[in-house]
Amino acid sequence: MLNGGLATRFGGVVKGTVNVFDNLSFLGLKIEDLRRAQSLYGRRIPLLVMNSFATKRDTAQHLTVNGCFGFEPGAIAQFDQSISIRLTEQGDPFLGGDGKARYYAPGHGEFFQRLHRSGLYERLLEQGVRYLTFSNIDNLGATVDPLLLGMHVTSRCDMTVEVIKKTKNINGQWDVGGAPLVLGGSLQVVEGFRIPTSVPSGRLPDFQTNNMYFTLEALRDPPVLPRYMVNKKVEGRSSIAFEAVTCEASGVKRAGGNPWLTLNLVRVPRSGVRGRFFPVKAQEDLEMIREALKERLESGWALRQQELG
């Protein structure tokens, strides 16, 4: 579970602690999904939460105050992203109005290295874990689904990425973000800012959700992802950061030219009872989809129980 963002569009609070419905936060609803999955499928599922320096303290406090939402505390492992200093466009440290440096977490693409550095990779192997699911804290549509996990397993690929059909919003603008395409002769998922401007958005039918699956053994030798320069306004001024994006692991190659991680793609529904993409980036997003999201979660679990008889 990726829990590193500070949620500036939520007023700078830690998004995972924000109430969604029924006095359950984003984090609480993610854990509720795991609790139901454990009960329904009869398997213990450990939870990994990757925090940043901005979310670590409040997340730990939120779990403690809420009794880990009924989840076994020992089954939750938190680990941290690294920390970097923002730069000015001239390459100097970016200082805020108080004269202090401004920091950032350099993207969720460093997940592979941080999993190893935290010691969690070896611990998971010792526990017999063979596969990882991967999703954003603010996408509650990314529930535990054995069908999708099974599709990853049977693909025999190292990495599976869920994609959805690209659509236009009410303003006529296409979804913005990564997409699968052939680049440099190989199929990979490319983050939006790297897609050549010569390729019209409408020509790429799919859009990546940041819901992924990894075969744990394939991460024994973790890929090192490139860092890309990101320009962001901080306190009204331009600042420079360098971030790694997880989907870009699909394009990293070994010395011999072979993919570091073999790629599988699965197109999933965006909405409905099996909908997989309900991102919440701002408070107004949450207000608009709150009821639909609640219906999706409850109906989805009722359907799974029915399918299992």
Image: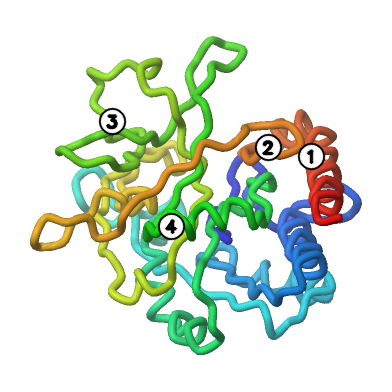
The reply to whether discs 4 and 3 touch (Cβ–Cβ < 8 Å) is no
Query: Viewer-proximal residue, 48 or 297?
Result: 297
First-in-chain label (2 vs 1): 2
Q: Is residue 200 above or below residue 267?
A: above
Task: Identify the residue shown where x is 46% and y is 32%.
Answer: 207
First-in-chain label (1 vs 4): 4
Residue 70: percent from left, percent from top: 84, 73
How many labels were placed on the picture? 4
Would you name the residue on which mark 2 appears? 275
Q: Is residue 81 left or right of residue 49?
A: left
Mark-to-mark CA distance, 2 and 4: 23 Å
Residue 157: percent from left, percent from top: 37, 57
How many other residues sit within 10 Å of disc 1, few (<14), some (14-19) or many (≥20)?
A: many
Q: Is residue 296 above or below residue 47?
A: above
Secondary structure at badge 2 equals loop
Which quadrant is home to the C terminus? bottom right
Q: Amino acid at mark 4?
A: His
Mark-to-mark CA distance, 3 and 2: 26 Å
Q: Is residue 243 visible?
A: no
Would you name the residue on which mark 1 appears? 296
Mark-to-mark CA distance, 1 and 4: 27 Å
The reply to whether discs 3 and 2 touch (Cβ–Cβ < 8 Å) is no
Residue 187: percent from left, percent from top: 27, 40
Mark-to-mark CA distance, 3 and 1: 32 Å
First-in-chain label (3 vs 1): 3
Query: Viewer-proximal residue, 165 or 17?
Result: 165
Identify the disc placed on residue 195. 3
Q: Nearer the viewer, mark 3 or mark 2?
A: 2
The reply to whether discs 2 and 1 touch (Cβ–Cβ < 8 Å) is yes
Secondary structure at badge 4 equals helix
Would you name the residue on which mark 4 appears? 108
Task: Identify the residue shown where x is 51% and y is 36%.
Answer: 267
